[in-house]
Image: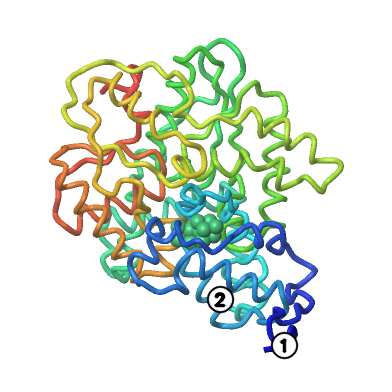
């Protein structure tokens, strides 16, 4: 064997597009292929395929980085099947930042998708989510369809992933401002403001009860998390700039959705190459708090056992698992662990629509695990998880109630 045989094959130029975000070389090479993340990856556990594991996905990125592969159908499937739950990131001893790598890989894939897919995604992520009036129009249409049971005509896959929206909750007003104290801007967001208005109302009262002047900028919209998740970083940046301008004067910015708070805390990184907006983004991002981090007032009353569901973007993105249990305990509940609790429920943004089979398996596993706890209530602090878990429980004809921690505050007892 000669020295030439022992040398690694020559590394070519990266096959990434240069006009959109790409996974960074230093992130890719930080993976040492140890495989310690594999047992923590929901898609690897379901399929047993290396191509559905974090190590396999990083190897695919490495192949493109080294010019040995291109962004083809196989690469696309591998990245699309990922939940972006970041369980691998928490498990990884080498600190591989998988979350930002998968987002950049998807940004690379986006221009290669069929024009109809790109058009639909752009319509939803770039136009509908950023315009509250469009979200409300969709909300009223859904509420009406559900009220007259027209939604039964929709495919089961869509029904299982649609929130229950009531006309009454859409019509009821939420105060623009409440309480006294330092200013707290509450993210109206996209889905929360339409499909979880009761939670939004309770959040205003909870933050005001915690000693802030809670304020809502109702002209605002999405924080950009979904756009970032689905390969549209420029849309995510545009949405971040709009929200940052609205929140510039707030002492704290509060989001009651795990995916939103987690994403908003990355705004500084997202806009770091923008000399005008970068410093402002970093300043606002530092003031972002998930509602679980606020000392909200709760009333202590017997609530029995409350199963605690950890949203991926709480435990993997923000290490907020203890906070959910603290709130449940203060409110008189007995926190109960869900078997396999750290595992994704399969909601993961639009995953239940885009990868229905894998999502349905994860939904069922999560619902079964919640029922097995014997708790009558499950606390969930993320809209996607709440919709997914409610659907899973309904499929199993369970009476377990899904509740957001904001609904446990003293101001919201009904
Ligand atoms: S991502 Fe981390 S845990 Fe997983 S194979 Fe790479 S180095 Fe190991
Ligand atoms: S983000 Fe989640 S689904 Fe994707 S590779 Fe990591 S653990 Fe697996």
> Residue furthest toward the right?
275
Q: Residue 234 occupies which quadrant of the picture? A: bottom right
Q: Which residue is mark 2?
A: 76
Secondary structure of the residue carrying numbered label 2: helix
In front of the other: 279 or 239: 279
Q: Is residue 323 above or below residue 109?
A: above
Image coords of residue 32 (percent x, y): 58, 61
Near-viewer residue (319 or 293): 319
Left/right of residue 76 with respect to residue 46 in the rendered view: right
For discs 2 and 1, the disc positioned in front in the rendered view: 1
Structural distance between the alpha carbons of marks 2 and 1: 38 Å
Residue 269 marker:
none
Question: On the picture, is 306 further left or further right than 242?
Answer: left
User: Where residue 332 appears, x then y in whole percent?
Assistant: 23, 20
Where is residue 6? Give x, y as percent: 68, 81
Q: Which residue is mark 1?
A: 2
Can the viewer see residue 83 in this picture? Answer: no
Above or below for 237 versus 209: below
User: What quarter of the picture does the C terminus occupy?
Assistant: top left
């Amino acid at each position: 064997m000669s020295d030439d045989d022992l040398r690694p094959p020559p590394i070519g130029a990266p096959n990434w597009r240069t006009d959109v975000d790409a996974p960074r070389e230093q992130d890719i090479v930080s993976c040492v292929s140890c495989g310690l993340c594999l047992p923590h990856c929901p898609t690897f556990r379901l399929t047993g395929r290396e191509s559905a594991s974090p190590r396999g996905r990083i190897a695919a990125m490495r192949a493109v980085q080294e010019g040995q592969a291109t962004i083809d159908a196989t690469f696309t499937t591998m990245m699309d099947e990922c939940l972006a739950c970041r369980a691998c990131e928490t498990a990884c001893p080498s600190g591989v930042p998988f979350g930002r790598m998968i987002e950049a890989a998807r940004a690379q894939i986006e221009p290669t998708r069929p024009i109809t897919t790109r058009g639909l995604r752009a319509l939803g992520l770039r136009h509908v989510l950023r315009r509250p009036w469009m979200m409300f129009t969709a909300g009223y249409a859904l509420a009406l369809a559900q009220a007259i049971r027209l939604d039964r005509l929709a495919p089961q896959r869509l029904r299982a992933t649609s929130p229950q929206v009531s006309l009454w909750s859409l019509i009821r007003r939420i105060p623009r401002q409440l309480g006294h104290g330092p200013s707290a801007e509450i993210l109206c967001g996209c889905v929360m403001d339409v499909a979880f208005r009761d939670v939004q109302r309770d959040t205003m009262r909870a933050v005001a009860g915690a000693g802030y002047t809670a304020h809502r900028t109702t002209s605002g919209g999405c924080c950009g998390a979904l756009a970032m998740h689905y390969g549209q970083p420029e849309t995510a940046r545009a949405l971040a700039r709009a929200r940052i301008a609205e929140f510039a004067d707030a002492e704290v910015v509060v989001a009651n959705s795990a995916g939103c708070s987690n994403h908003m805390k990355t705004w500084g990184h997202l806009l770091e190459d923008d000399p005008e907006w970068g410093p402002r983004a970093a300043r606002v991002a530092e003031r972002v708090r998930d509602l679980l981090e606020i000392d909200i007032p709760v009333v202590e009353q017997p609530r029995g056992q409350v199963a605690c569901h950890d949203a991926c973007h709480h435990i993997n993105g923000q290490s907020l698992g203890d906070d959910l249990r603290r709130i449940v305990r203060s409110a008189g509940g007995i926190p109960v662990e869900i078997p396999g609790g750290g595992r994704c429920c399969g909601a993961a943004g639009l995953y239940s629509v885009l990868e229905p089979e894998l999502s349905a398996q994860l939904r069922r596993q999560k619902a079964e695990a919640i029922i097995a706890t014997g708790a009558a209530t499950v606390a969930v602090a993320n809209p996607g998880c709440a919709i997914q878990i409610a659907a899973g429980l309904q499929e199993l004809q369970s009476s377990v109630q899904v509740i957001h921690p904001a609904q446990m505050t003293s101001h919201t007892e009904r």
